[in-house]
Structures are given as C-alpha cells and as structure tokens.
Amino acid sequence: MSVSLAILILYIIALFGISWFAKKRSEGNAENYALAGRRLSAPLIAVTIIGLAVGGASTIGVSEHAFRVGLSAGWYTIAWAIGAIVMGIFMAKKYREQNITTISELIERHHGTNAVILGVFCQIVIQLVIISLQYIAGGSILHAIMPEVFDFKTGMLVSAITFISITFIGGMWSASLTNVLNIILIYFGIVVATFIQLDKVGGIDTLAKTLPANVPWFSFTEGVGLKTIASWVITLVTVNLSLQSILQISLGAKDAATARKGFVWGGIIMLPVGVLAALLGICAKSMYPDAQAALALPQVIVGLQPVLAGVTLAALWAADVSTACNLLLSAGTLFSNDIYKRFINPKCSDAKQLTMMRLCIVISGVLTLGMAMGVSSILGTIMIGLSLTAAFSVIVIVALFFPQYSCKAAGFWTLLVGFIMLVLWQFVPAVRIFPNVIYMEWFACILTYAVVAVLQPGKKLAADTAE
C-alpha cells in the first residue's frame, strides 16, 4: 500500500470517528440534525462556510481553469469570499432573526404556497448540480493517488459513498466538526504544496519561461477577463444571499451576531485559497503540458515527497467532503421539511421527519452520482447552476428589506421565469443578449417581480390575507 493511500485511509477513518461523535449531538430531533440545535459558535460558522465554498470547484476546478488561462482563475474563490462577507454584513443577522429552518418558510410568509413548491424544486436542482461536481473532483484525486486501483469513475463512487455516509450519520454537527479537520488539512496541504512546487520549478521567473507565450499566465485579470470576473462576483454574491445550504449555516448559529461574525471571518480566511490553487494549476501546465486539465493538479501533487503528497491529496479530497456534506444535508432538509412535512404527512413525528431527511440524503447522493458521470467542466457547469439563485435573491431581498412591497403572486412567477431563462440560455442561443446568464437572470427576475406586483397589487403578504 502506498503512503499516500494509507494517509487517505487514516483521514477517512478520522472523518467517520468525528461523525460518530457528532451523532450524539445531532440526536433527539430534526432541528439538532439539520441546524446543530442552533448552537454553532462563530469559529464553527466560519469553518463551515469555508468548507462549503472551498470545494472541488475552488481547488481542482480553479487549477483546471488556471491550467488553461493562468492566475486569474483564482478569482472564482475570491468571488466566493466576497459573497460570504456580503452575506455576513447584510443578510446573516436578518436570516437568523427569522427563526426559520429553510428559505421556503420565509418565501411562504410573503409569497404563498405555489412559490414554496417551485422554490424547493429549484433549490434542490441547484444543490444537486454542485454536489455532482464534488464527485468529479473527488474521483480525479483518488485516480491520481492510486491509478492501478481507481479509475475516474470508481474514484467518484468511493467519494460518493463517503460523502453520503458522513452526512447521514451526524447531520450539521458532523459537517461542522469535520470541517475543523478539513480546513486545517486544506490550508496546510495547499500552502506547503504551492511553495514546494514553485521552488522545484525554480521560482516564478523560471516557471514563466517554461510556459507557452500566448497566455497571460501571471496576469490577475487578463486570462479570464474582467467580464467573467464580474459575472463570478455577481453570481457568488447572489448565491450567498439565498442558497439554502448557506442560509442553513447561518440559521445554525447560536445568535444573530454570531452568524454575522462567522461569515465575515470565513470570507476573509478563504481569500488566498483560489490564488494558491491557480498557482498549482500553472505549475501543472509547466510539468505536464499535455495532461488532462482536471487531472493535472493531482498529478503534480503525486510527484511530491510521499507523506506530503498524501497529506495534500487528502486536503484536496477534504475540500470535496466539506462541500458535499453541507449540500446533501441542505437538500434533505428542504424536501423533508417543505415537501414531506408540509404537504405529504403534516402530522408526522419528529423522528419520522428525521428518518425522511436521512432517506433524502441517500437519494440525493445517488442521483448526483449519476449526474456526475456526464459533466465535463467543473467551473463552467457550476456557474450555470448557481445563476438560478438570482430569482431567490430577488424575492428574499423584498421579503427581508421591503416587506411592504411583497406580492404573493410575484414570488411564484419570479422563480418560474428564472428557471425558464436558465433553460432558454442553455438551449436557445438567440436569447443570449447579455454577456453572462447571471445578468439575464437578474434583469428578468427583477422585471418579473415588478410587473406582477403592479398588475396584482391587491395580493400582498400571506399574513395580510390571513388577517
């Protein structure tokens, strides 16, 4: 058995050990499982949002993109950090004060039942897309560690089984506590690997001489371009405002101030990760110019000293674990709370709801494994899926900041138009009049909400109707 594989196995054992410890805290009721009993401290909030953000897209995905365009690929993770900070400053406190479990509860208070059903569907679709990308990144890492045992698909299968099991066992406590280990591994592995690789290739100047001359490898903006950078920032700020898995982290805080502090700290701490992953991608281009882009970074790391290689590869895999667990939990929470308990079995016991939540986690995990088999580009796919959160952001901003202007009918139509616009963007090139789908989503959703609110001014808050 190789040293790298042995380290990975030890890491998996540690994850399951933490998860079983977390299981004791998560027992009792659905709130303990889904929201850690609303007892998370600011440091746990910070590591959990970092763990969600710094997943396969922020490590393998960024290095894959940097392999083609250079250092500017690191802006993806910087955009995530900006989004987390914006969420912390403007939204985390307001969400925590609502005393809700899912975003659908907030939507229903202001926009009615139809919006809830469509909203749950859209949120689950978004999260399934992101989970599937963690399997791709996890598969590439395991294939790099032991290619004679794991091919790309079996690596994804092992990743899926591990991610699903950890989430199934301990819920939010499991996701939060394992992220303490994950973040330590991620930062140690990526920082050390970056400095060693740069030293191995002779520093930045020598590295630059070995790369193709037609790419702005070390420009902080030119590779992906300002338009793409702007679209990343707008998309990921949007995501942080309204994605259930992010909202769920803030709802798990012990109070509103803790939620705010945790998100701001988390955003600041995650800033350097994307730049380091991009540098490793550039090193990979120099060392393996003909490699498959998604496998380039793992190949570079396998060439390190065996113990360091094992720790770093475990760190990259940890990034996938941390993201996938939060998203699987979020998908399970949405269905069990907003579909099963709300419409299918309103009188279900807390134990029955918890069982349904765990079942949904398993089903979501299996579905996303199938999706992962057909995805080619990590960053390209994730940005398309995340753009759908624009519709949610529009309606929750109205609900939290301008409730006097909320319109019940507008919530449903805004979500529907957001989903339709995403489908049209994918399959009807003629509608692409904006430089990126996120701009079209914001324009269409704001316009839809405003028009419906004007045409149906009498249909306001659900609370108003009840009165």
Image: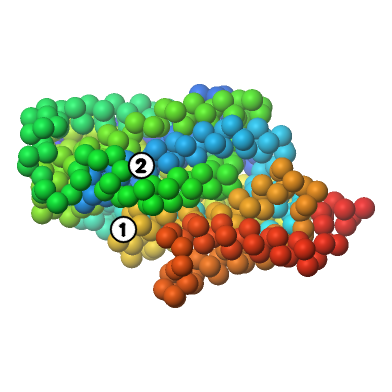
Which label number is shown at residue 213?
none
Quick one: 17 or 335, which is closer to the camera? Answer: 335
How dense is the environment of label 2, judged by Cα within 10 Å: few (below 14), some, or many (20 and up)? many
Which residue is depicted at the point 77% across and 47% down? 403
When the figure is inspected, residue 38 is found, relative to residue 146, above or below; the finding is above
Which residue is depicted at the point 80% across and 66% down? 456
Quick one: 143 or 352, which is closer to the camera? Answer: 143
- Residue corresponding to mark 1: 377
Which residue is depicted at the point 62% across and 37% down? 91
Q: Secondary structure at mark 2?
A: helix
Tell me, what colour scheme is on the image?
rainbow
Which label number is shown at residue 75?
2
Q: Nearer the viewer, mark 1 or mark 2?
A: 2
How dense is the environment of label 1, judged by Cα within 10 Å: few (below 14), some, or many (20 and up)? some
- What distance separates the C-alpha of mark 1 from that of mark 2? 17 Å
The x and y percentages for residue 27 are 60, 36
When the figure is inspected, residue 414 is found, relative to residue 156, above or below; the finding is below
Q: In the rendered view of the protein, which quadrant contains the N terminus?
A: top left
On the question of residue 22 being in view, the answer is no
Which residue type carries mark 2?
A: Trp
When the figure is inspected, residue 202 is found, relative to residue 316, above or below; the finding is above
Left of 90 or right of it: where is 379?
left
Quick one: 376 or 285, which is closer to the camera? Answer: 285
Question: Do tag 1 and tag 2 residues touch (Cβ < 8 Å)?
Answer: no
The x and y percentages for residue 331 are 54, 52
The x and y percentages for residue 223 are 26, 48
On the question of residue 379 being in view, the answer is yes
Q: Secondary structure at mark 1?
A: loop
Left of 324 or right of it: where is 391?
right
The x and y percentages for residue 11 are 31, 33
